[in-house]
Image (cartoon, helix red, strand yellow):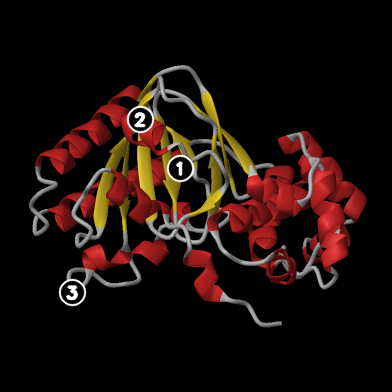
C-alpha cells in the first residue's frame, strides 16, 4: 500500500495562523489567543504539524476531541498536542486562552533532539488536558507574558519555551505523584488508548486489542464503557472518523487514497462506513 505522505501537508494550521496574522514565517514559533481562532474560522478535525501548548484562563467550559478522546476545557485547563495528532475544537471564543505553537527547530543546537520525545503529553494517546491549580495557572500565565514580550527576539524565545515545557512537565509529574492508585480498569483504558493510536489503521476489530491486553472483547468494552462512556467499537470508529475527516478537509487526497490510507481496501465499504459515522458520504463532507 503506497501512502502519499506529501498530501498530508496540504493544510498546515501552524502556517495558516501565521499567514493570517501576518507573522514572521521564518521563526519556528507562533503565539495565538481566542481572537486568533475566532478569525481563523477552522472547525473541522485537523492534524497538527507543530507542537502546541495552551492554557485556558476564563470562560464557560468547552470541549475538544484529541485523537478519539473527549476532554472538557475550563479555566485552568492546560492543553498539549504534538505533531501528527488529529484534534477537533468546539468553538468557545468567549473563553480567554493563550496557545504557543512551535516546531522542533526551535531547539536546534541548543538541547538534545530527544527532549520533546521525552514529554508523554505530546505523544499520541497521552494525557493531553491537565487541570491546573490557580497557582499553577498563574505561573504559566507569567511565562506566556514573557513569551509575548520577547516574541520579536528569536534568540531569547528558545529558553522561555523550554522553561514553559519544563513547568508543564513538573505539573504532569505532580499529578501522577498524587496519592491515587490507578485501578486495573484505568490501566486497561490507558493501555487501550495507546494501542489504538498505533494500530487503528491496520486493526479495526475489538478482538485484536482485547488479545493484546489479555482480556476478552466483552470485558474490554465493559471497562471502556464504564470508564469513558464509549465501547471499544465506538472508540475505534471515532478514531478512524477523526482521521478521515481531517484528511478530507486538510488534504488534496482522493477518497480512494484516503480509503487506502486508513486501511480500507474497498472504497465502497469505506464510503458506506463513513456515511454510517457522519450521515453523509465522504464527498458530501468534503464540500461542507
When the figure is inspected, residue 205 is found, relative to residue 53, above or below; the finding is: below
Residue 249: x, y in percent? 58, 52
The residue pinned by badge 1 equals 177
Mark 2 crowdedness (10 Å alpha carbons): few <14, some 14-19, many ≥20: some
Camera-side residue of 19 and 86: 19
As drawn, is 95 to the left or to the right of 31?
right
Mark 3 crowdedness (10 Å alpha carbons): few <14, some 14-19, many ≥20: few
Which residue is at 46% across, 57% downward?
Answer: 11
When the figure is inspected, residue 132 is found, relative to residue 212, above or below; the finding is: above
The residue pinned by badge 2 equals 34
When the figure is inspected, residue 120 is found, relative to residue 132, above or below; the finding is: below
Front tag of 2 and 3: 2
Residue 31: quadrant of the picture? top left
**Sequence order check, earlier mark of 3 and 1:** 3
As drawn, is 170 to the left or to the right of 71?
left
Which residue is at 17% across, 50% downward?
Answer: 160
Q: Is residue 135 visible?
A: yes
Question: Residues at badges 2 and 3 in contact (C-beta under 8 Å)?
Answer: no
Residue 205: quadrant of the picture? bottom right
**Sequence order check, earlier mark of 1 and 2:** 2
Instruction: Pick the quarter of the image with the N terminus.
Output: bottom right
Which residue is at 35% across, 71% downward?
Answer: 114
When the figure is inspected, residue 161 is found, relative to residue 278, above or below; the finding is: below
The residue pinned by badge 3 equals 109
Residue 215: quadrant of the picture? bottom right
Amino acid at each position: 500500500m503506497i501512502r502519499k505522505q506529501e498530501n498530508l501537508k496540504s493544510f498546515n494550521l501552524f502556517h495558516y495562523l501565521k499567514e493570517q496574522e501576518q507573522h514572521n514565517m521564518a521563526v519556528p514559533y507562533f503565539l495565538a489567543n481566542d481572537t486568533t481562532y475566532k478569525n481563523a474560522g477552522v472547525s473541522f478535525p485537523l492534524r497538527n504539524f507543530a507542537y502546541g501548548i495552551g492554557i485556558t484562563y476564563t470562560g464557560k467550559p468547552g470541549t475538544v476531541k484529541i485523537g478519539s478522546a473527549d476532554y472538557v476545557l475550563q479555566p485552568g485547563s492546560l492543553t498539549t498536542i504534538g505533531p501528527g495528532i488529529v484534534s477537533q475544537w468546539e468553538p468557545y471564543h468567549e473563553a480567554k486562552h493563550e496557545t504557543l505553537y512551535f516546531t522542533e527547530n526551535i531547539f536546534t543546537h541548543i538541547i538534545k533532539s530527544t527532549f520533546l520525545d521525552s514529554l508523554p503529553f505530546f505523544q499520541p494517546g497521552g494525557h493531553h488536558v491537565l487541570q491546573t491549580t490557580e497557582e499553577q495557572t498563574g505561573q504559566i500565565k507569567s511565562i506566556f507574558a514573557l513569551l509575548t514580550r520577547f516574541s520579536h527576539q528569536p534568540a531569547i524565545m528558545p529558553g522561555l519555551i523550554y522553561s514553559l515545557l519544563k513547568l508543564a512537565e513538573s505539573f504532569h509529574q505532580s499529578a501522577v505523584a498524587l496519592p491515587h492508585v490507578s485501578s486495573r480498569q484505568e490501566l486497561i483504558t490507558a493501555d487501550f488508548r495507546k494501542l489504538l493510536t498505533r494500530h487503528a489503521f491496520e486493526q479495526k476489530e475489538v478482538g485484536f486489542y482485547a488479545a493484546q491486553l489479555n482480556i476478552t472483547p466483552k470485558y474490554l468494552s465493559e471497562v471502556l464503557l464504564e470508564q469513558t462512556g464509549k465501547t471499544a467499537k465506538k472508540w475505534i470508529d471515532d478514531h478512524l472518523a477523526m482521521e478521515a475527516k481531517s484528511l478530507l478537509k486538510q488534504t488534496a487526497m482522493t477518497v480512494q487514497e484516503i480509503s487506502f490510507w486508513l486501511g480500507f481496501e474497498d472504497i465502497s465499504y469505506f464510503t458506506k462506513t463513513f456515511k454510517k459515522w457522519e450521515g453523509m458520504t465522504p464527498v458530501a463532507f468534503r464540500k461542507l
